[in-house]
Image (spheres, rainbow, N blue to C red):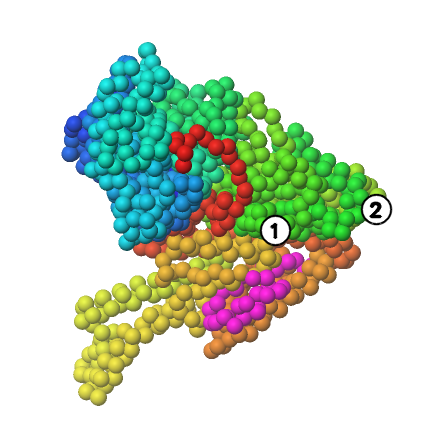
Amino acid sequence: MCGNFGFLGKRLPQDDAELLPARVVEIFKTMGRETEIRGEQAGGGAIFARDRANQAIFVGEKVVNQKRKNLTQSLESAFSKTRRKAAGKGAKASDVAVLGIWHYRFATSSPPAVLETHWHEWMPARFANVWRVEEGKWICGRHLVNHRITHNGDFDGWTIFDNTIENAELGLWLQRVLHTPNAALGDSPKIAGMMDLLITQGMWDASLRLAHQLAIAESTRDACGGRTPSKDAPNTAPTEVEIEEWSAIAEKVFLSHQGKLLMPYASSMLELSRKHVNQFEQELVQAFSQHHSIGQWSARLPNFVKTAIHVFFHNNLYQATKLFLSRAHGSFGLVTASTLSEATLVVSAWGQPIATGFNVQDDYMVYASEPAAVDAVLSHIPRSYRLDLDQKGGEIAWVGVNHITVYSMLEDRELRSSELEERWIPLQGNSYILPPEEHAADPVQRDIQEIPKILKSIEQSWDDPTSFNRQTADYLVELLIEKAKNLKLERVTDTPAIDLLITGVESSLWLGERFAQDLTLICPALTVKTISSNQLLQRLQYDGSLRLGKTSIVLAISQSGQTFPTLQATNALEELHLQGNIREFFILTGELCSLMGTAISQYYYQESSFTRRIFINGSGRRTAEPTTVAIAAAQATLTELLLHVAKQLRARFPAHQGAFGMTLSTADVLMLEKMKIDFPNRAEAIVGITAKGKINRSSDYSQLLQSSKKWAQHIIEAPLVWAIHSLYIALTVGLGIPFIQTVFRIIFGFASLSIPGFLLPLLIAADILIYIFGPWLWSLALRYFQHRPLLARTGKRSVVIGDAPWIHQLLRCYVSKLFSLSYGIASLDVHGGNPQDHMLHQYGHRVVRGSLIFLGIPDGRRSPMQKESESAIVMSGKQAIGVQNLSTGAEIIALGHDPAIAHQSFQDAIVLSSSNIDTSFDRQITLEELRESRFTGFERLLASYVFFWAMAKQVASFPLLQYQHWKSQSRTRIMTTAAPVSRATVDRTKRPMERSGSR
């Protein structure tokens, strides 16, 4: 879960002599803030500069972020010092270009450490003779050679010697071949080692070393004395002295041929005369055959020479990256940079995203794993464009300040300019691109307050027949109508295929599961299943029991549109769709422009057509980890879809049973429609603000804030008591006035008496007891004045959230993330369960004095089924209260719509306002169950968001213990690497790319 980003542009006159101009620092900060959601454990940055000898050098810094610090600020603080120190030692800005590469890391293959943090290099900077072609002439110079990489993804292995060498073995082999040890444990450092091996253009020593491995060596054992690579295996790879001898021979022959090798008017060393290269090759074979060790290779010598010459002329940064990826296994968002090419970068996307963006008017480009980072920099600048590399087929881009060459791994060719032009995404006036999220001091509060506005925009979108959502929904309905007509024919088989499969992970999956249950309630004959994206990936590869057929429809849900397992499942399912193995494939995301959208061939340039396969919830990109508005928007969108499907199917099949055994009448659908229309007003009352942004301090909102204060007081009790007791000790000990003794001295002093000798030891003992048990005594006093239970346990509290499965799962994640950065002395443990099922069995034995239980209770006034549910939950609550010690047990807050819950002996009850209730119970059970899942349960969820946010806000504001409640330490807002299923689980094919040598 990592992120690459960077900048490459011309140096402007106003940049002065700064190694990294101030304008680029601001671009770094903008992109860094957007990339933090991919991981904030550690980060590194590097730029090009020139040393006193005018050699190109890297200046870089890495940091491991502290738990409650911001990585962007921490990295720039450290990096700026490093740049100043480098400037003090004579480093000066490169006049060729301004180039910066950055990487943010979430540790996967190795723990967070500076050594494991990107950028990575294997071999340190070293001098080498490097040949170049300038103005049609060969020039040899002594250059400082250094290659660095940043990588997002997983590097599993590399194919050489007709075998795939796994990462760990590859590292041991590289240490011997390169004669450079490397202590890093991660997979990415091995990529840096491969770049040191593969970048050979213009360098005879590097070219001959690589040629030996490609054409002479037969296995990794050759470099390890015939043994399997291990830490204690010997190094029998060609020594540096041997390679110097070979280089001297090659250099001598090369000098005798160099004048003939280039084509007339050649501008690079790739423009060669094939005839003269062949002559050079033959003479070099003859020269090497005279060498005492090389001459023994006989039959393999010509291939060795041919390979060495080829990589000497061709293997620049770009070609070396192509060669590496042609044999690599894993997923790669890869950036490679070299001091030999300080005005260009190579960025690659294969199984991981890379977006590039170009600012035409200011002559610079940016790139990022997170497309929003590119948008944040360029969206306000005229004539700016974004190009997303194809991560599915694999693309490698060689980029300069104002040019880009893109190589397609799938098609094994460089794409034409006209092909790239069709893919440029304009960032201004593009209805497919949402503006970047504005910065907020409290993103959770901002997200909650925007819920009414987003719900209103969703409603307007679905009311518009031409909107993207309606177009997609109408297409889905067409497919369902077609399926309903053929229902009897399809059910003839013993194991009918799934009609609709819904997939996602975590919150997206839980919402999908509830949607599937509700759709099945409406259409019992429709076979609807749900599965996590990780399980789907595994079963697509190894298990044929998914029951997907040629008539099956699949819906994948991901708020970000790039959650790794769901994105990889999207790629696999789209392949099934293209092959005709499933009928259709839809996605639901937070915004139209997403990687999942790209995966199903939705393009985002202004003239592109809409695929009618994407649902958009309109919440956009959200950086707060405790997610609220994204969940609300997805729930509302799925409700709109559910009602649209029900309405259209009922209209198309008006008979009593309708399509798929439909259980709702036209009147029922209209009643649900009315509930949906009323819901935004209820949301405004709950979150305390209207869709237009006006404050609405309703009774619901005020109740939630008031009730949250007491639980917040429970959490901050320990640090507050600690502070009081510390002050007590400081005063009584510091001033030498023990409290009890001082009081008695004052009392006896008024009577002009001294304290009796027998009483003094007792007073001293009393003072000692206060010092020992003071925190508990202060707790009792504090609880008394705050009207909280006196005898609850002191210390860390536990919260158990009891509600319907989809609600308590969402809230458990939400609350735990709100407190993920809280200090241990002011924190809480979070659990969840279904109070109608297993909650008491799971947590009843763990109830202690002061346990906090938050119960969401359905409105029992609505139907007999809801009444039974309410009674069951109330019973669970009362049973929890019954677990007592010292006449004290759990503290329960009940949340619901029925005023009766306020009279159930719970410590607190939050009764949300509701419309008038018809108590006749003559309405359809299905209708009331849908009311509960789509609306009243949704209201409880929104109310819980406000309650726990207010509680966390108060805890996070406690002096000296402040923390950012809207994020976690690692900032894993999006799962962007295997989570936990690897991308390799899904079969993938690629065409072989041009390779040097036979192995």
**What percent of the width, then of the height, locates residue 205?**
25, 32
Query: Cα distance, mark 2 to mark 1?
Result: 39 Å
**Residue with the mark numbered 2:** 656
- The quarter of the picture where residue 189 lies is top left
Residue 661 in the image, given as x and y percentages of width and height: 79, 48
**Along the horizontal axis of the image, is 29 left or right of 565?**
left
Q: Residue 38 vs residue 868: left or right?
A: left
Please identify the residue farthest to the bottom as the structure is shown.
Answer: 758
Quadrant (top left, top right, bottom left, bottom right) of the C terminus? top left
For label 1, the crowd category at 10 Å Cα-Cα, with few meaning under 14, some 14 to 19 and many 20 or more, is: few
Answer whether residue 893 is magenta in the image.
no
Q: Position of residue 246 (x, y in %)?
A: 24, 32
Q: Is residue 900 visible?
A: yes
- Viewer-proximal residue, 944 or 467? 467
Q: Residue furthest top?
A: 264
* In this rendering, position of residue 842 left or right of residue 96: right
Residue in view at x 57 percent, y 68 percent: 840
**Residue drawn where x is 43% and y is 43% of the image:** 163
Q: Answer above or below: position of 875 versus 21.
A: below
Q: Nearer the viewer, residue 629 or 130?
A: 130
Q: Which picture quadrant has residue 998?
A: top left
Image quarter for residue 197?
top left
Question: Which label belongs to residue 693?
Answer: none
Give the percent coordinates (x, y) of residue 151. Answer: 38, 39
Marked residue nearer the N-terminal end (2 or 1)? 1
- What's under tag 1, amino acid-wise? Asp
Type of the residue with mark 2: His
What residue would you read off at disc 1? 543
Magenta extent:
833-861
Q: Disc 1 on helix, strand or loop? A: loop
